[in-house]
Image: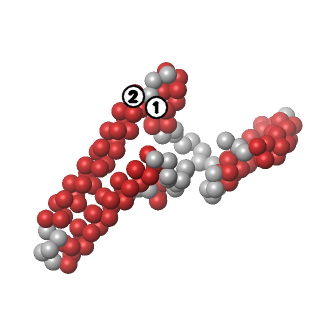
Amino acid sequence: MVKKEHEKEIREIFKKTLAVRTKGPEAKELADMYFFETLVRIHRAGEGAPYTGLKPGEAIEPVIAEADKALESGSVDNLINILTNDMSKGIRERFARAQETKKHADENVEAGREFVEAYVEFTHYVERLHLDATGKLAHHTEPEEVKK
């Protein structure tokens, strides 16, 4: 999405891109790249996110493809099942690790640290899921920030 205040800039760049594209294959490639980089940069800025460049050849995440399928088919059921299964698996794995390390937490300092680490990972994971589900997690949070 491009915010309304940036529409004029995008339209001007698009017109320039169309004009330059006619100058040959190299000019076309360069003009297209400039247009897409500018479009993505402005889009990311509108979200309050940094522009980190285009990532050529990146595949669409399967869940995004499934979201597109849901819109095309008019049914969100398969998407919900995929997400529910992924979340359930993530919760269960982190819970199992926290539960197992808790059994040995009082044995020594290292075991206590392992439990605390597992506990923090488990609680942060469920917190992020909840915040996102309730609309309180920022859109496009960087993947490194939300892995655990």
x 48%, y 40%: residue: 61
Q: Check whether the beta carbons of the residues at disc 1 and disc 2 lie within 8 A of each other.
A: yes
| Tag of residue 103 | none
Element type at mark 2: helix
Tell whether 113 sits left or right of 132: left
Q: Amino acid at mark 2?
A: Asn
Q: Is residue 101 above or below residue 113?
A: above
Q: Residue at x 56, y 42 (%)?
A: 57
Up-down relation of residue 12 to residue 41 (above or below): above
Q: Residue furthest top?
A: 73
Kind of residue at disc 1 = Glu
Query: Could you tell me residue 36's position as x and y percent?
Result: 71, 43
Which residue position is annotated with label 1?
66
Q: Residues within 10 Å of mark 2 (few under 14, many from 20)?
A: few
Specify whether 144 is left or right of 23: left
Residue 74 image position (x, y, % from top left): 49, 22
CA gap between label 1 and label 2 equals 8 Å
- Residue 78 versus residue 91 in the image, above or below: above
Residue 78's disc number: 2
Q: Nearer the viewer, mark 1 or mark 2?
A: 2
Q: Residue furthest front?
A: 134
Whether residue 45 appears in this view of the structure is yes
Q: From the viewer's perspective, is 7 left or right of 72?
A: right
- In this picture, residue 48 sits left or right of residue 137: right
Residue 139 percent coordinates (x, y): 55, 50
Lower position in the chain sequence, tag 1 or tag 2: 1
Position of the N terminus, as image quadrant, is: top right
- State the SS at label 1: helix
User: Would you say residue 26 is visible in this rendering?
Assistant: no
Q: Nearer the viewer, residue 35 or 122?
A: 122
Residue 44 x %, y %: 65, 51
Q: Tell me which residue sits at (54%, 53%) in the image.
A: 138
